[in-house]
Image (cartoon, grey):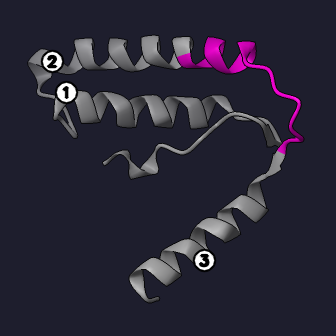
Amino acid sequence: MCRSIKPLFNFEPPVTEEEVRAASLQFVRKISGFTKPSKANEDSFRAAVEEIAAVSRRLLESLETSAPPKNREEEAAKARARGAQRFGG
């Protein structure tokens, strides 16, 4: 489940709200054990996703580095190559 949570700091172009929310959703899914919550838990689940997204955004905005930003396309190509080598594809 958490494999779809990707590093979001120090990329060019910068992280989007959609990416932060997607990572937050995956985190809440992982710790709650729910892929989709029941009706009884739906409001709590959504609130947790929104709160974690807000905290994550603040964290990303506060981080500093002297390293140059990573290129998203190059990093995605490296990840695909690692996956192909790992899984023989």
Q: Find out whether the residues at labels 3 and 1 contact each other: C-beta distance under 8 Å.
A: no
Q: Residue at x 44, y 10 (%)?
A: 51
Q: Residue 43 at what x, y percent from top left?
A: 25, 13
Kindly state the secondary structure of the residue where label 1 is placed.
Answer: helix
In the image, 86: left or right of 30? right
Mark closest to the chain's N terminus, 3 or 1: 1
Circle 2: element type: helix
Earlier sequence position, callout 1 versus callout 2: 1
Q: Which residue is mark 3?
A: 81
Residue sitting at 40 percent across and 81 percent down? Answer: 87
* Highlighted range, magenta: 56-69
Within 10 Å of disc 2 (Cα), the crowding (few <14, some 14-19, many 20+) is: few
Q: Nearer the viewer, mark 3 or mark 2?
A: 3
Label 1 crowd bin: few (<14), some (14–19), many (20+), radius 10 Å: few
The residue depicted at 16 percent of the width and 34 percent of the height is 33
Residue 79 position by quadrant: bottom right
Residue 2 sits in which quadrant?
top left
Mark 3 nearby-residue class (10 Å; few <14, some 14–19, many ≥20): some
User: For this rendering, which residue is in front, 53 or 42?
Assistant: 53
Residue 28: x %, y % from top left: 31, 27
Q: Are marks 3 and 2 in contact (CB under 8 Å)?
A: no
Label drawn at residue 41? 2
| Amino acid found under the numbered disc labelled 2 | Asn
Residue marked by disc 1: 32
Q: Earlier in the sequence, mark 3 or mark 2?
A: 2
Question: Considering only vertical position in the picture, is 37 above or below 85?
Answer: above
Residue at image coords 82%, 27%: 65
